[in-house]
Amino acid sequence: MTCVMGYGTRVPFLHPNAIVVNSRMPKKTLTQSAGAVAVGRSRQKLRTRRLLIETAVQLIAAGGQPSVTEVADAAGVSRRTAYRYFPTREKLHAEAALNGLRPVMDAAIAAAPPSARGTADVESRVEVLVSNMQRLAIENETLLRTMIHQTVLKPRADREPSRGTRRLEWIETALGPLRPKLTAVAYERLVNAVALCTGIEALLVLRDVCGLSADESVKVSQWMARVVLQASLSERGTSRRK
């Protein structure tokens, strides 16, 4: 679409939300920009979900048994959005109950080695993180299995996360020192990969499918997370040498 200006000059009409792309911009830069936008949207969804859970925790602590609608209203989130994250009150209340694990994990991560000495410390932090996450998953296995059941029954019509806010936050806390050293896309991929090595999903495979004991499951999860971290660091080193 074009607009006619004075003296017959025609200029392109741009929608207010349009993204202007410089044709001379390197392809790599375009890819990184698109990746950063996607990461930003993902983080916004996680913030909304966390707000709903924290609001539910507050209402339950005050003695209530809030519905999804009541939590949405109290949080200032549209009811439609709230129901996309939590289609039932049971699922919302289960998430709120599991949110009580946050202080335990926060304390464990805080007790991990500081990051002043670089990569070795990050590996130690990840190992502590995975160990504690899997121990908590084992201790709360029944509740987590119930949540899995509720989640898989919900049809996925979009990419909004159904669960996992706490997990991603804990992983990012452990990996935080690496964030400025990786591209936005590489960092997000690393967080997602470590998430796959942890939690009830990994525990289900290792115990139900592989037949491992609780201790064996924790050790395998730690090994997987360590390998993923080392692969990301290796790629970063290779990229810097080019």
Image (spheres, rainbow, N blue to C red):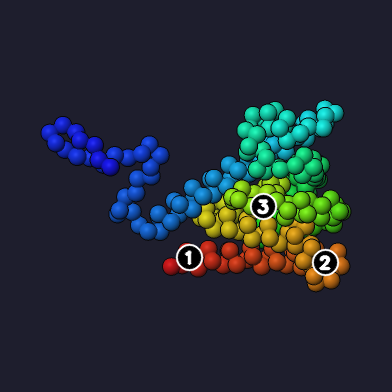
Mark with earlier residue (3, 2): 3
Real-space Cα separation, disc 3 to disc 2, in angstroms: 26 Å
The amino acid type found where label 1 is placed reads Ser
Real-space Cα separation, disc 1 to disc 3, in angstroms: 40 Å
**160 above or below 89?**
below
**Where residue 121 appears, x then y in whole percent?**
68, 57
In front: 19, or 9? 9
Q: Secondary structure at mark 3?
A: loop
For the N terminus, the image quarter is top left
Numbered disc in front, either 1 or 2: 2
Residue 232 falls left or right of residue 128: left
Identity of the residue drawn at 40% across and 39% down: 17
Q: Secondary structure at mark 2?
A: helix
Identity of the residue drawn at 85% across and 28% down: 63
Real-space Cα separation, disc 1 to disc 2, in angstroms: 37 Å
Question: Crowding near pointer 1: few (<14 within 10 Å), some, many (20+)?
Answer: few
Question: Residue lying farthest left?
Answer: 7
- The quarter of the picture where residue 68 lies is top right
Label ID, residue 239: 1
Question: Crowding near pointer 2: few (<14 within 10 Å), some, many (20+)?
Answer: some
**53 above or below 228?**
above
Residue underneath mark 3: 155
The amino acid type found where label 3 is placed reads Pro
Identity of the residue drawn at 19% across and 33% down: 5
- The quarter of the picture where residue 13 lies is top left
Residue underneath mark 2: 207
Mark with earlier residue (1, 3): 3
